[in-house]
Image: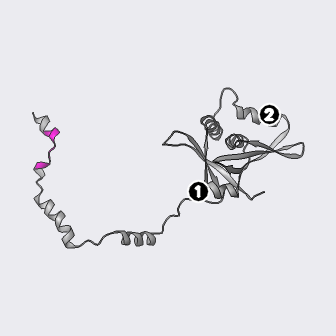
């Protein structure tokens, strides 16, 4: 089995382009993120758990939590183990009567359950390499100065003369808009 990396749920977001939901997982000790597209109802279930919103009746993931607890089982962790054809695959890792069992599930359901039961979320290194995102590091001020010097054109007196002539010839009284003239009538 590949190396597993601990992550936390950073946020649940809405795509501006198509209104789909995305859960963003953040690596525990690094600035590396894993975006996973999820369904509307799963996004709502995760958000409810993260914000500790009380609902009148138990949702499906609340039912699963109660079922696991009533069977004297323990959810040890949830895992996102692979990515194939743009589909993520996950597991619930349960301990039942001292024996560890893995149960196949959708990562969105695993995350909703992990948020309710506050258990670790692990992602395989292979999945992070395939789909993880590392933001660009901030540039130092000396690097920014270097970039600015390279990208700015040289300005000489002759280049600025055009603007100077324009400003000299401008009549401030002529700056009224058509709407100002309409108001006077």
Q: Position of residue 63 (x, y in %)?
A: 74, 32
- Position of 87 with respect to 142 (left or right) is right
Q: Which residue is mark 2?
A: 67
Q: Main secondary structure of the magenta part?
A: helix
The one of 110 and 52 positioned closer to us in this rendering: 110
Q: Position of residue 135 (x, y in %)?
A: 54, 59
Residue 133 tag number: 1
Q: For marks 2 and 1, give the one nearer the viewer.
A: 1
Query: Which region is colored magenta?
Result: 174-180
The answer for how far apart the CA atoms under marks 2 and 1 are is: 36 Å
The one of 6 and 108 positioned closer to us in this rendering: 108
Q: Secondary structure at mark 2?
A: helix
Instruction: Count residues near mark 2 (Cα–Cα under 10 Å), then give few for <14, some for 14-19, many for 20+.
Output: few
Q: Residue at x 63, y 48 (%)?
A: 86
Quadrant of residue 158 within the rendered picture: bottom left
Quadrant of residue 67 within the rendered picture: top right
Instruction: Count residues near mark 1 (Cα–Cα under 10 Å), then give few for <14, some for 14-19, many for 20+.
Output: some
Residue 26 tag number: none
Q: Secondary structure at mark 1?
A: loop
Quadrant of residue 55 within the rendered picture: top right
Q: Position of residue 143 (x, y in %)?
A: 45, 71
Q: Residue at x 58, y 59 (%)?
A: 134
Q: Quadrant of the N terminus?
A: bottom right
- Position of 111 with respect to 172 (left or right) is right
Q: Residue at x 48, y 67 (%)?
A: 139
Q: Residue at x 41, y 73 (%)?
A: 146
């Amino acid at each position: 089995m590949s190396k597993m990396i601990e992550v936390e749920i950073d946020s649940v977001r809405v795509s501006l382009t198509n209104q789909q939901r995305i859960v963003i997982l953040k690596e525990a000790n690094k600035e590396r993120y894993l975006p996973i597209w999820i369904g509307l109802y799963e996004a709502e279930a995760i958000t409810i758990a993260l914000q500790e919103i009380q609902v009148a009746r138990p949702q499906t993931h609340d039912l699963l939590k109660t079922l696991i607890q009533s069977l004297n089982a323990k959810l040890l962790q949830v895992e996102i183990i692979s990515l194939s054809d743009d589909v993520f695959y996950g597991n619930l890792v349960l301990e039942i009567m001292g024996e560890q069992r893995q149960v196949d599930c959708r990562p969105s359901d695993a995350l909703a359950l992990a948020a309710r039961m506050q258990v670790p979320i692990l992602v395989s290194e292979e999945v992070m390499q395939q789909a993880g995102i590392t933001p660009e590091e901030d540039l130092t001020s000396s690097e920014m100065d270097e970039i600015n010097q390279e990208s700015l054109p040289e300005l000489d007196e002759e280049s600025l003369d055009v603007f100077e002539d324009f400003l000299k010839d401008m009549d401030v009284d002529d700056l009224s808009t058509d709407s100002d003239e309409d108001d006077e009538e």
